[in-house]
Amino acid sequence: MMKSLHIEAAKCTGCLQCEMACSFENYGVFNPAKSRIKVFDFHETGLKVPYTCTQCAEAWCLKACPVDAITKDKSTGAMMVNEATCVGCKVCTIACPFGTINYVADTGKVQKCDLCEGSPACADACPTGAITYIDADSTGIDRMRTWAAKLENQTAGHAD
Amino acid sequence: MAWQRKILRVDLTAGTCTSEALNMDWAMAYLGQRGLATKYFVEEVAPSVEPLSPANKLIFATGPLTGTMASTGGRYSVITKGPLTGAIACSNSGGYWGAELKMAGWDMIILEGRAASPVYLHIENDTATLHDASALWGKTTWDVEPALRKIHQDSQLKISSIGRAGENGVLYAAVINDLHRAAGRSGVGAVMGSKNLKAIAVRGTKGVAGIKDPKAFMKATQAAKAVLAGNGVTGEGLPKFGTQVLMNVINEVGAMPTRNFRDVQFEGAKDISAEAMHAPRETDGKANLVTNQACFGCTIACGRISKLDQTHYTVVNKPEYWAASGGLEYEAAWALGSANGVNDLEALTYANFVCNEDGFDPISFGATVGAVMELYQMGVLTKEQLGIEAPFGSAKALTYFAECTAKGEGFGPEIGLGSKRLTAKYGHPDLSMTVKGQEFPAYDPRGIQGMGLAYATSNRGACHLRGYTVASEILGIPVKTDPLETDGKAGLVKAFQDATAVFDSAGICVFTSFAWTLVDVAPQLEAACEGDWSLDNLNVVGERIWNMERQFNNAAGFTNKDDNLPKRLLTEAAKTGPAKGLVAGLDKMLPEYYAERGWDTEGRPTATTLERLSL
């Protein structure tokens, strides 16, 4: 089953465990500056929103890359950066409408979320369930359930 | 190696920033943050130093677990000699700033001297520079943060700053980071102001590497997080209700100091409780509480984010206060509310916003207002002097005083002295509810006897964060003791004090200790850090830190006579509740405490004790 990261911002407390887990997974260091998932704190409303690559089916980054350094991983659906091929031209960072692929000065390459080979460290680390890794075709299932519950009393045949 | 092994020393007089290696011998003996920074402080600063003079130093310090995946590993402390108390001051804050400093590659910053004119410190990884802050002087912390991000074109800068209270020398001025997290107590913000230092802006992209055993560390931190998640207090009570979960509990046990400690129960407690923060308002149908919030790395998330009622008298036509911001924690709700007999939740929230905005401690401020209101009721202070009628229960007086103290206007500078100096000035020193000049927090020692001893012996003056025996006496953590009994409290207080010193020195939040003991902390430190961080050694480290602080205070002129409580608590019995008829039994506990500590009858560590602790 293809899975995708599912983000429910309302559950996020802004602890940044996801950012530390991401940097630790990829660089062996606790460093939000190197994280591929970022939590945004909209302090005027109190809302915190984790944000990362959605792994577009038709990915701007992949199409923009002049050296074909970005390919799709068939098992996870993630767009993967082949560091050996990447020349650090940054065209992908311009092409991506969401800003989720970024240049890393230390390596001279770009980086993006690669879904940790199907076991995303951010989702494992999230203490509130704001980030989960679930069936890619059913990311709306919980919202559907919530709305379905609201219809309960109107359902025909539910007389008692 | 979870330390960065690097200190930034800033000479504000000379205008220089230099890097030096962390003394690792001291790190092995004092761990980090509170312990290690205090070691530097006592080695470098004379105990007799005048707190607001250039000779005093100000240290911002992180711990080895700051900036790691250890839950709550985002803390930093500000260490100095406090102007409110004249004792060692160490105020701890969360938010994101501490972790950012660590990520920039520094364990601590030692600030010395005094800048000739206002400056701020900008740190970008290894590079630290002082800049002119004359355009920022006079601005609030809420204005300084966006201003610095704009100046440096860096939306990710983390900022720790003082507001006008710190500039104006309010003796309990705080250092504020991330808009509403505070190194709140003992006046560390006033020391920052006395040095003409407005802010420290940090951007760190180096991260924390070199964990001794990464695999073991991830395992240990995961296990410890599971303990927090499974605990009723840290897993349910604190995320949902914040520390305000205590308001109704403490009121019911008759330990809610009310109207400057005249009473021990507040009839309006329910109006300013956690439950009240959750309830929809009559005016706009919305709750005061918007959401909970975590500090860096915290899996508890007890922080309160509130929005004010836009029709409330405090903020009508003041849209700058309509956004969400740091809401009421229990201590603030008590100090701004019960201590003054005020039960207007929105007024308290507004006063709390103002405390954050201009950087001053709501506990000392609120408790000082309590003394002012009592002096007003007695006719000692008048409407003409105060600028407003100020009987107990007046929300309008409370919020007016908050504004005056923030701006340094009207009677504000008098309130900014704290209750000890203010009540002495007006001839009624007995009405100051303080120890060593610092105002009490939210637990009446007549109803929770152990807290009386904890207050009397706290190294930074009256405080709930040096030995929180409430956990045992009320909540039964780790074992239940009778809050009305004095027996056994000496040992309990010592155990809490020593353990807390370790939590504060590790870089984690003391609120974890609702669920964790040092048994949970030790494996995390052992996996992260070189050195001996076994349970046995941690107990010694905690006790060593406590005694080091005590020695500084003794050398600064404090004696056993300062390990005392105000006359009211020793002679006026509680009028209601389970503690009715009781006074604080300090005299029964203090000698036993000295003996437990290995101190002589004057409260001085004996030679044997010092040798045992390698001091």
Image (cartoon, coloured by chain):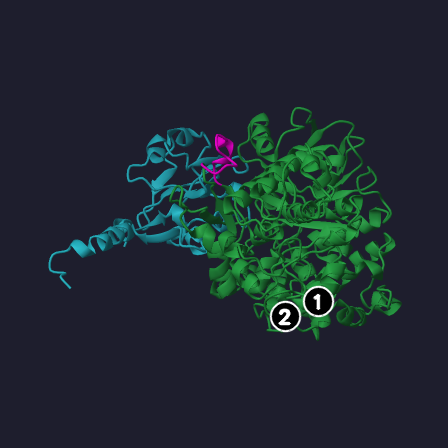
Chain colours: A cyan, B green
B315 and B592: which is toward the camera: B315
How many numbered circles does the render carry? 2
Residue highlighted by disc 1 = B583
Q: Position of residue B102 (x, y in %)?
A: 63, 45
Judged left or right of residue B188, residue A17 is left
Seen in the picture, residue B321 relative to B290 is either above or below; the reply is above
Mark 1 residue type: Val
B387 and B25: which is toward the camera: B387
Q: Position of residue B162 (x, y in %)?
A: 66, 37
Residue name at image x 76 percent, y 47 percent: B423
Predominant secondary structure in magenta? loop
Judged left or right of residue B527, residue B595 is right
Q: Is residue B218 visible?
A: no
Residue highlighted by disc 2 = B483
Q: Chain of mark 2?
A: B
B317 and B183: which is toward the camera: B317
Residue name at image x 76 percent, y 57 percent: B459
Seen in the picture, residue B486 relative to B555 is either above or below; the reply is below
Judged left or right of residue A133, residue B464 is right
Q: Secondary structure at mark 1?
A: loop
Q: Which residues are magenta?
A: B311-324
Q: Earlier in the sequence, mark 1 or mark 2?
A: 2
Residue name at image x 75 percent, y 27 percent: B117
Residue B314 lies within the magenta run: yes
